[in-house]
Image (cartoon, grey):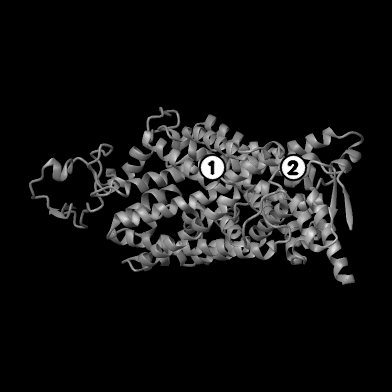
């Protein structure tokens, strides 16, 4: 039996074939399967475990480690879980499934996948811009992790626990320095006790009377600001590139990322089998150890103590929605790309349920590890838990090293923690880099079939982004990092892309059409609940949260430093560079067509699907006929 499939209506950039007509021998199921393999030239995962671990590693990131525990504590404790679960159900899972199913159906990256609704291809381009920004700045966190990891193997005291290093000032005081409540003025330094009557020299205790309590600094603060960052007082005082230790760490981070993806998804999948699972082992070890420490119960109580009155505040629901989008990497092109490597008939629906549940559970469990350690830190330093809680880099690179350094075997605990941090970061990083590579290779598929072409592209991408990443290393680099973090991949841009995704599928491609496509892939239609979310609930929620962000906007201020207007303007340009892709491509696509506005709209709305879809559909029909006559 011979089947001829015409490909006249398939665009070259979305097709996987160089010819417009395919001749397939489908006389039996086996030959039909072989035909599919010849048509579907895209790589696929070696097995289901690699697929699951790679996507899990991509979505389990810093948001789970340093953001979720903090906002859970700040916005109602245990009560925050209610809006979080609500947003997972109505925003997180519907969009996670949408992106995964779209990639699996189209077998394309984030841009090519939106040929399904050509007028909305700007959604894919906007996602590409977001993932590019993310690749450039996110790896700096991994480089910081390498910096701390290397220093965790120091012989003797950890360098961020002492005040006798070249970067320390005379205001530095070690953790063991204390004043009693009666102001009798004593200090415990290096396990020796000195009172105000003791004769002190500069080695034992210099500049004691010259530094008031409010002006003292901890060694970890000076290690972070004066050694790791070499931080200046403002963005205007940008400085020069002289932090060569950080340059080396950045290079190590990029080389490690490159080695993970050197053979595409084949090598990335094998690496992810380790990098996505081993952090759970380390997290479990840290959590068990943390829960056995004095003061841990107070920290966990602060984490989970429910404050139901917080649920009446709109900001709590906004934070829950934005956290869900960040946690699940929605709008960053990663899910579409990873989904495109699935087998066409894989049950991505159940696959997504497991992944979404795993991500939410990881965020919740991580809070126990974080707050048990913070509770112990508060206990040791005679502070309230609220006084030691931080979010973002401050939690990971200052508070946590401080707490772990007060434990027995501090070198071991810090090394384990930063090794876990590096692994978590690498998972997300190489998934995003692979997204960019797929965007390019999908656009010029013929060129990248040449020998070593993809390997050279990966080398070029990693090398170029490493060079761009040097902008974060001078004294003012941390201010540039915060610009990227607060504008380039801001909640406004991410939520806009998320909202446009659901609108594109529901109203441009057609919700019923997409449900039929999903049924063709997995053999059944998903719950009608998902359809309702894509059509109404998800765009309303994401749009509402985005509008709230816009109205609550204030010029960027980091720890008392207010960014100059020109810096905020640059930030908004980065934010709008992804935001404006949607309307710009929409208008451009209409202008490219001829005829009246209605004729242009009709022509521009026609989906351009890949050749493999027709082949799969024909194979399914032939299989049904074979069963009927057998």
Q: Which mark is residue 548?
A: none
Residue 518 on image: x %, y %: 76, 60
Look at mark 1 in the image and give the residue it sits on.
486
Left or right of 49 in this view: 102: right
Residue at x-position 52% and y-position 33%: 468
Mark 1 residue element: helix
Say which of 607 and 34 sits in front. Answer: 34
Camera-near label (2 vs 1) is 2
Q: Is residue 326 above or below residue 277?
A: above
Residue at x-position 22% and y-position 57%: 181
**Image quarter in which the C terminus is found:** bottom right
Residue 449 on image: x %, y %: 68, 40
Residue at x-position 79% and y-position 61%: 520
Q: Is residue 119 above or below residue 104?
A: above
Q: Is residue 452 visible?
A: yes
Look at mark 2 in the image and give the residue it sits on.
121
Residue 482 on image: x %, y %: 49, 40
Question: Quarter of the image holding residue 354?
Answer: bottom right
Q: What is the distance, in whole Å, between disc 2 and disc 1 at their CAs?
A: 25 Å
Residue 64 on image: x %, y %: 51, 56
Say which of 214 and 508 sits in front. Answer: 508
Q: Is residue 552 visible?
A: no
């Amino acid at each position: 039996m011979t089947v001829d499939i015409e490909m006249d209506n398939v665009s070259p950039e979305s097709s996987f074939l160089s010819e417009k007509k395919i001749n397939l021998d489908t006389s039996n199921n086996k030959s039909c399967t072989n035909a599919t393999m010849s048509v579907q030239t895209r790589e696929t995962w070696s097995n289901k475990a690699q697929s699951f671990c790679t996507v899990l590693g991509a979505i389990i990131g810093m948001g789970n480690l340093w953001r979720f525990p903090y906002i859970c504590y700040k916005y109602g404790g245990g009560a925050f879980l209610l809006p979080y679960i609500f947003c997972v159900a109505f925003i997180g899972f519907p969009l996670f499934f949408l992106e995964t199913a779209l990639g699996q159906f189209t077998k394309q990256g984030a841009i090519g996948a939106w040929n399904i609704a050509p007028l909305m291809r700007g959604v894919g381009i906007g996602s590409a811009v977001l993932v590019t920004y993310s690749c450039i700045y996110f790896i700096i966190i991994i480089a910081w992790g390498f910096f701390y990891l290397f220093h965790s193997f120091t012989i003797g005291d950890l360098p961020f626990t002492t005040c006798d290093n070249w970067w320390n000032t005379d205001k530095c005081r070690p953790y063991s320095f204390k004043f009693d409540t009666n102001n009798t003025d004593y200090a415990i330094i290096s396990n020796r006790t000195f009172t105000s009557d003791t004769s002190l020299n500069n080695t034992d205790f210099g500049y004691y009377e010259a530094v008031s309590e409010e002006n003292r600094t901890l060694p970890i603060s000076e290690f972070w600001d004066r050694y790791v960052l070499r931080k200046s007082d403002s963005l205007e005082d940008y400085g020069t590139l002289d932090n060569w230790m950080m340059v080396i760490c950045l290079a190590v981070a990029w080389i490690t990322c490159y080695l993970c993806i050197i053979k595409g998804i084949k090598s990335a999948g094998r690496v992810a089998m380790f990098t996505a699972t081993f952090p759970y082992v380390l997290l479990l070890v840290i959590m068990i150890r943390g829960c056995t420490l004095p003061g841990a119960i107070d920290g966990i109580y602060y984490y989970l103590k429910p404050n139901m009155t917080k649920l009446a505040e709109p900001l709590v629901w906004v934070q829950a929605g934005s956290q869900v989008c960040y946690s699940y990497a929605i709008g960053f092109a990663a899910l579409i790309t990873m989904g495109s490597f699935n087998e066409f008939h894989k049950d991505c629906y159940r696959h997504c349920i497991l992944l979404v549940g795993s991500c939410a559970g990881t965020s919740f469990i991580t809070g126990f590890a974080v707050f048990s350690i913070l509770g112990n830190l508060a206990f040791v330093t005679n502070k309230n838990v609220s006084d030691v809680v931080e979010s973002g880099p401050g939690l990971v690179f200052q508070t946590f090293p401080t707490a772990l350094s007060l434990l027995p075997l501090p070198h071991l605990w810090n090394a384990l923690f930063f090794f876990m941090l590096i692994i978590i970061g690498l998972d997300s990083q190489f998934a995003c880099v692979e997204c960019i590579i797929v965007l390019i290779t999908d656009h010029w598929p013929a060129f990248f079939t040449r020998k070593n072409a993809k390997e050279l592209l990966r080398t070029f991408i990693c090398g170029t982004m490493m060079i761009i990443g040097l902008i974060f290393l001078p004294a003012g680099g941390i201010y540039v990092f915060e610009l990227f973090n607060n504008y380039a991949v801001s909640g406004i841009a991410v939520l806009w892309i998320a909202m446009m995704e659901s609108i594109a599928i529901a109203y441009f491609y057609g919700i019923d059409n997409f449900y039929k496509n999903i049924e063709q892939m997995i053999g059944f239609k998903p719950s009608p609940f998902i359809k309702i979310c894509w059509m109404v609930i998800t765009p309303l929620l994401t749009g509402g949260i985005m509008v709230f962000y816009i109205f609550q906007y204030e010029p960027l201020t980091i720890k008392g430093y207010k960014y100059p207007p020109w810096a905020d303007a640059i930030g908004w340009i980065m934010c709008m560079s992804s935001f404006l892709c949607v309307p710009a491509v929409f208008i451009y696509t209409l202008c490219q067509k001829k005829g009246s506005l209605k004729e242009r709209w009709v022509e521009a709305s026609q989906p351009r699907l890949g050749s493999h879809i027709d082949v799969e559909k024909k194979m399914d029909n032939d299989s049904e006929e074979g069963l009927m006559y057998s």
